[in-house]
Structures are given as C-alpha cells and as structure tokens.
Image: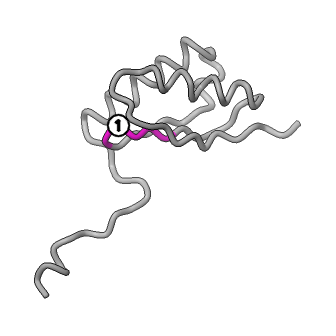
Amino acid sequence: MLAACAGEPKSSHPPESGSDAALSARVKAALATDVGARAAGAVNVSSYGGVVELSGFADSEAQASRAAQAAKKVQGVRSIRNEIRVKSS
C-alpha cells in the first residue's frame, strides 16, 4: 500500500531542470539561425530529458518542418514533439 503512494502523478509539462533549460536555449538559438529570428520568436520551446516540444505558430508548413529539422540537429535532443500550427490566412 505504501508503494502506491510513493509516486507522484506526472503532468504533461513537467518543470524544466537546468540542463533542460539549457537544451531549450540551444534549440531556440538553432531555430533563430535556421528559420530566422522572427519565425523563432513565434515558436515556444520546452524540453524534458532530451524530449523537445515545439509549439506556437509558423507562416507555412515548410517553416514548421524546417523548425523541427533544426531542433533535431541540436546535441542532446533525443526526440521532437512538433506541435507548431500553421497560421491561417
């Protein structure tokens, strides 16, 4: 019975540790380099244990895809959750 109480429920967005925050910063810098500062500013980056989640908006499907590709190149990224949405015109 005690073991059942030991675990804490996991949220869908756990808080970032120092290394997660550093990884998010490196991904954000890579996005600014690869897709441009304006586009990178519209994308939110969070990470947990090497899993990076991208969210926010892009001007096109190609831009959203380029952002995910740029993030995958960053050392320490194990996987990408691309939740970027394309702005409707």
Badge 1: few (under 14), some or many (20 or more) residues near its Cα, within 10 Å? some
- Above or below 8: residue 61: above
- SS assignment at label 1: loop
Residue ID for mark 1: 50
Quadrant in which residue 64 is drawn: top right
Q: How many marks?
A: 1
Q: Position of residue 68 (x, y in %)?
A: 57, 29
Q: Which residues are magenta?
A: 49-53
Q: In the figure, 84 relative to 13: above or below? A: above
| Amino acid on which disc 1 is placed | Gly
Viewer-proximal residue among 59 and 62: 62
Name the magenta segment's main secondary structure.
strand
Farthest residue to the bottom: give it.
1
Q: Give the residue displayed 58% in from the left and 40% down from the top.
A: 82
Which quarter of the figure is the N terminus placed in?
bottom left
In screen coordinates, is 26 left or right of 43?
left
Q: Residue at x 25, y 35 (%)?
A: 18
> Along the line of sight, which residue is nearer the eye, 2 or 21?
2
Residue at point 55%, 16% (across, down):
32
In the current view of this chain or complex, which residue is farthest to the left?
2
Answer with left or right where residue 86 lies relative to residue 21: right
Q: What is the image's colouring?
A: one colour
Magenta region includes residue 79: no
